[in-house]
Image (cartoon, helix red, strand yellow):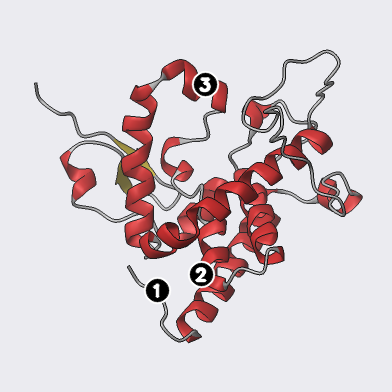
Amino acid sequence: MTTVDEWILTSEGTEQPISGFKLLMCKAPRIEVIAHSLAQINRYTGHASRPYSVAEHSLLVADIVASMGLDHHAQRLALMHDAHESLCGDASTPVKVAVGTAWMEFEHPLALLVRTTYHLKAPYAAHGKAVRHADLLALATERRDLMRFDPKVNTPWSVIDQPGARVRPLDGIDLNTPVREAMIWRHHRDAFLARYHDLEARCKAMPGSATA
């Protein structure tokens, strides 16, 4: 069976492979291209109370990891944990479950491409579990602030509503402030880029900087 090489056209006009042999021979897009895309991809299949992008979510996860006292490598991993969605889009968890292993087989090589290109493999090995926990904290907070979820009516979300292991939303964070509601996608693109470049510089300045 012949493997078909597929690609997407990026915001800077380049053809980026997303599957097939060519994917093995390329790098992930430039950080500017990733930020542009993530700032325009909305989470929750567009059903949040306002446009809520993957870029804004990624910044929140990076903030949470910072509040845990983890270093700049962990924070940069948190910021980039969904960067591969600039190539495959953001599919909600129910969609991924419905598609099954085919989605994992498609998504995983793209996530690995980003980790390899941006030297995130070592930070992922060291901090992947912590970033996943921060991701779930962000999910619980987003559901509280942005979704019309009523525990008396709606079905529990298995990833954060497990009996005895419920993930609770964060106090002190409000995703519905007037400032947040007034922001447009370019604000989140620019904030993502600024955070990335700041963390990258801090990582390079740290002794024993991880580059694997």
Q: Give the CA separation, mark 3 to mark 1.
A: 34 Å
Viewer-proximal residue, 137 or 106? 137
Name the side, left or right, on which 182 lies relative to 88.
right
Which residue was labeled with disc 2? Answer: 73
Vertical placement of residue 25 versus 210, above or below? above
Q: Position of residue 131 (x, y in %)?
A: 56, 53
Which residue occupies 62% across, 31% down?
A: 159
Q: Position of residue 169 (x, y in %)?
A: 79, 42
Q: Which-is-in-front pick, marks 2 and 3?
A: 2
Which residue was labeled with disc 1? Answer: 210
Outermost residue toward the top in this view: 153
Name the side, left or right, on which 20 lies relative to 33.
left
Mark 1 residue element: loop
Which residue was labeled with disc 3? Answer: 95
Mark 2 residue element: helix
Mark 3 residue element: helix
Q: Which-is-in-front pick, marks 3 and 1?
A: 1
Viewer-proximal residue, 96 or 67? 67
Q: Amino acid type of disc 3?
A: Val
Vertical placement of residue 28 versus 200, above or below? above
Density class for disc 3 (Cα within 10 Å; few <14, some 14-19, many ≥20) is: few
Residue 192 sits in quarter: bottom right
Residue 43 sits in quarter: top right
N-terminal of the pair, mark 1 or mark 2, is 2
Q: Is residue 186 visible?
A: no
Q: Amino acid type of disc 1?
A: Ala
Q: Give the CA separation, mark 1 to mark 2.
A: 8 Å
Q: Amino acid type of disc 2?
A: His
Density class for disc 2 (Cα within 10 Å; few <14, some 14-19, many ≥20) is: many
Q: Position of residue 37 (x, y in %)?
A: 52, 47
